[in-house]
Image (cartoon, helix red, strand yellow):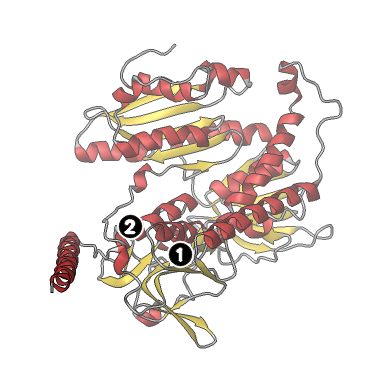
Amino acid sequence: GVQFEATMASRLAALVASALALVTEVDGLVGSFRSGVARRPARWMSMHGFDYDVAIVGCGVGGHGAALHARSMGLKTCVLSGGDVGGTCVNRGCVPSKALLAAAGRVREMSDEAHLASMGISLPGGAEYDREGVATHAAQLVAKVRGGLEGSLARLGVDVIPKFGVYRGPNSLDVGDGEVVTAQDIILAPGSVPFVPPGVEVDGETVYTSDEALLLEHVPEYVAIVGSGIIGLEFSDVYTALGAEVTFIEALDKLMPAFDREIARLAERLLLSPRGVDYRTGVFAAKVTPGKRGERPVVIETIDAKTKEPVETLEVDACLVATGRVPNTAKLGLAEAGIETVRGFVQVDEHMRVLDKPDGAVVPNLYCIGDANGIQMLAHTASTQGVSAIENICGRPHVVDHESIPGACFTHPEVAQVGLDEDAAKARADEHGFELGKAVSHFRANSKALAEGEGDGIVKILFNKDTEQIIGAHIIGLHAADLIQEVANAKSAGTTVRELAFTTHTHPTLSEVVDAAFKECVGMHSH
């Protein structure tokens, strides 16, 4: 009798403990619903009858980042890769382009006799390169990085399905051949593809996009680049280093429209003028007809961007179409599911939840990240949005601070930015009634930059003089893409320029150029 009573008491205690835990979780669930994002504790997942807790359509940097974080949260996860693990960034974008830029940068440096002579170095005969060897370097890097991504997914237990998923309504993806994958939550991460304007005929050999250019199957003697954004600038850097002549064709009135205007002017002086790059602004490449290598040129007919009147006809060896990218959403089945996109971009709220139309209602259990939502078309933004989506799925409301995400152009020298440019910062200051502060420091005053013979460039900090909060930062100079991260982290954390001015930077390092700008913000002298 005593043993029976003890056993029953033990079971009763366990039931009470379970009930209390359930009450706690329900209380958290109710609270999170009030906050606008449903919370489902991880241990409740996989009790819903679906194949997976999370299914991700697309395996680029965004889908990969979401999958890793989902597994960190204990969620059963699959990725529908469409046979393209790594996506654009790894296979046709960030990764191979950096390999080409690295090789081209070394050719440029070793071909600069004056620069080498200033350090007591000579290279008789100059530098030579093997095009096929450079292309192989890029291809091998792609294979290595892609293998690393595949390995990380396998180690963490993510199911990688080499099929494309078509949305068929709540919790359901059609993967073809009558097969359906179900999941409690679905994340769309299909990425983007190059945009080819009307009138441009792409043959992949003489007229091509960045997809083909990254293969470096040839280096043309004279190439026209349509578009002066980051992709166009990086390829200009590669081509000119390898001996090609370059002409930009830009539809807008100003070159490099993505850059702060002061930085753009300096970039023209450092990246274009000394390399013999010329340009046409305010014109469209209305018609581009492919040529044939060694036999006939590519013909580019341009018109005025405003009047649409003919301007001139260019004949070149090759034409790179670098006019931006468009979302890869056409085959997702969204229209059939009653979801309206804007020029293909999926509309989302701040929690990455899909909306059925602009400013519309939330589509339950459906998220979209990366280039496909068009908020900020950067690989690392896609990854951040993927992590954010998983946080929201797990009931921890999270919003990405897109203004604190940096971007970079990996030319020689590099260009990087975070936050607002000066024109946008002035407009915000006028709108909100605060005084805008601006501080500029120069690489030519930095010991490390001078030791490298790389004294060109500036760091510009824009800040609110009342709160001393950073609004934007822009850098052009040696390793700008690395230097911008300090400013981005400070902006994200809300650190003031005064607090930053009193931090210590290692000497002698390039980071002291950033330090000098912080000190300039609050009237301190660094030189």
The kind of residue tagged 1 is Ala
- Is the residue marked by circle 1 packed among few (<14), some (14-19), or many (20+) residues within 10 Å? many
Quadrant position of residue 146: bottom right
Q: Is residue 262 visible?
A: no
Element assignment for label 1 = loop
Q: Is residue 507 visible?
A: yes
Residue on which disc 1 sits: 189
Judge from the rendering whether residue 453 lies leftward or rightward of residue 441; answer left or right. right
Position of residue 443 measured from the top left corner of the image (x, y, whole percent): 52, 22
Judge from the rendering whether residue 435 lies leftward or rightward of residue 330; answer left or right. left
- Is the residue marked by circle 2 packed among few (<14), some (14-19), or many (20+) residues within 10 Å? many
Position of residue 512 measured from the top left corner of the image (x, y, whole percent): 47, 21
Q: Are marks 1 and 2 in contact (CB under 8 Å)?
A: no
The kind of residue tagged 2 is Glu
> Residue 391: which disc?
2
Q: Is residue 506 above or below residue 48?
A: above
